[in-house]
């Protein structure tokens, strides 16, 4: 699987980008141990003007590079946490719907359709506006709009798997339906669901940036979206304040998508080989 991942250009590029981003995020407390929201120097210092502030400072004198590094940490936390929550909820709901069938299936799928009527970003926007901006609320808001995709994929896989011979054999020998679902059905339904993880992570990173841009992110944490929003006021005189975090956001999202494409290609070629 890993060898096939590195045999594709998308997989190599995505892995390198994500590896660098992860290392930067993990090393953020050691690279910049001070508070990235604290004043670190003169205001609006241009990039590469002072070795102590390689990417300059913002309107309040905060170090841009420190904000960029700590923003990467925030993006990874939100992206991975929201994707994990959405995949967990979606897998559970989809498995229950597909395995139970009947009224349970109908009810759960109608709930999923109700969530799909409202765009995920608008749902997150409304949820954060009501609950208040904080890291757990932002993660929950993003997951709230992303669980329906994994649920539908899991349901489709379970509907196919539950009719197979080895599942029928387990029913014949008297295995409990819950045990069949957990031991035989769910593990085989997970791989297609997990293939959605890269899309959900990338979407979560973008949604978090958009919420922060609108002032609905956690005010106690530095984020790329908030940095882009801060730079709007001085876009003509100091465009780097918005351009630098904007480029970081694009690179992160592209890296996640490329890594996901590489994983899908590797898993597809593996199934063909088998």
Image (tube, helix red, strand yellow):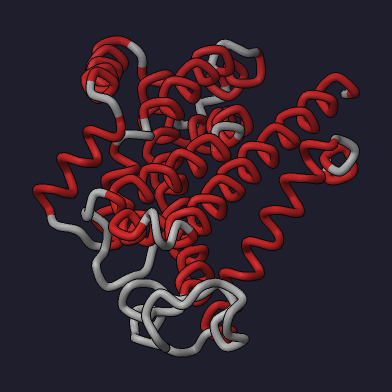
Q: Is residue 104 visible?
A: no
Q: For the N terminus, which image quadrant?
A: top right
The residue lying toward the viewer, choosing from 103 and 194, is 194
**Who's the residue at 17% across and 44% down the image?**
127
**Who's the residue at 56% across and 11% down the image?**
163
**Who's the residue at 37% across and 34% down the image?**
146
Q: Is residue 134 left or right of residue 254?
A: left
The residue positioned farthest toward the left in the image shown? 130
Residue 184 at x, y = what percent? 59, 31
Residue 21 at x, y = what percent? 63, 61
Asked if residue 129 is positioned above or below residue 122 in the image, the reply reads below
Residue 42 at x, y = what percent? 39, 86
Give the total of numbered labels: 0
Asked if residue 171 is positioned above or below residue 61 in the image, the reply reads above
Residue 29 at x, y = what percent? 52, 83
Q: Is residue 187 left or right of residue 139?
A: right
**Who's the residue at 61% across and 76% down the image?**
48
Asked if residue 114 is positioned above or below residue 217 in the image, the reply reads above
Q: Is residue 144 left or right of residue 32?
A: left
Q: Is residue 258 visible?
A: yes
Q: Is residue 34 left or right of residue 219?
A: right
Q: Quadrant of residue 104?
A: top left
The residue lying toward the viewer, choosing from 46 and 251, is 46
């Amino acid at each position: 699987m890993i060898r096939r991942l590195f045999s594709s250009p998308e997989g190599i590029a995505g892995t390198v980008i994500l590896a660098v981003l992860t290392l930067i995020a993990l090393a953020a407390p050691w690279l910049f141990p001070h508070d990235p929201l604290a004043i670190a120097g003169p205001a609006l210092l241009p990039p590469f003007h002072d070795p102590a502030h390689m990417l300059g400072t913002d309107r309040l004198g905060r170090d841009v590079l420190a904000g960029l590094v700590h923003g990467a940490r925030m993006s990874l936390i939100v992206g991975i946490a929201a994707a994990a929550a959405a995949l967990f909820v979606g897998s559970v709901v989809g498995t229950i719907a597909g395995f139970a069938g009947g009224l349970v299936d109908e009810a759960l799928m109608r709930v999923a359709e109700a969530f799909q009527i409202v765009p995920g970003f608008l749902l997150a926007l409304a949820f954060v506006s009501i609950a208040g901006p904080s890291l757990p609320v932002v993660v929950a808001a993003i997951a709230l709009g992303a669980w329906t995709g994994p649920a539908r994929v899991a349901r489709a896989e379970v509907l196919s798997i539950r009719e197979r011979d080895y599942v029928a054999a387990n029913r014949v020998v008297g295995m409990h339906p819950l045990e069949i679902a957990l031991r035989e059905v769910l593990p085989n339904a997970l791989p297609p669901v997990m293939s959605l993880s890269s899309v959900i992570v990338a979407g979560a990173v973008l949604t978090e940036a958009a919420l922060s841009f609108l002032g609905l992110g956690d005010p106690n944490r530095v984020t790329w979206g908030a940095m882009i929003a801060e730079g709007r006021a001085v876009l003509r005189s100091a465009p780097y304040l918005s351009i630098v975090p904007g480029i970081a956001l694009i690179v992160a999202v592209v890296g996640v998508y490329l890594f996901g494409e590489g994983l899908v290609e590797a898993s597809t070629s593996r199934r063909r080989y088998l």
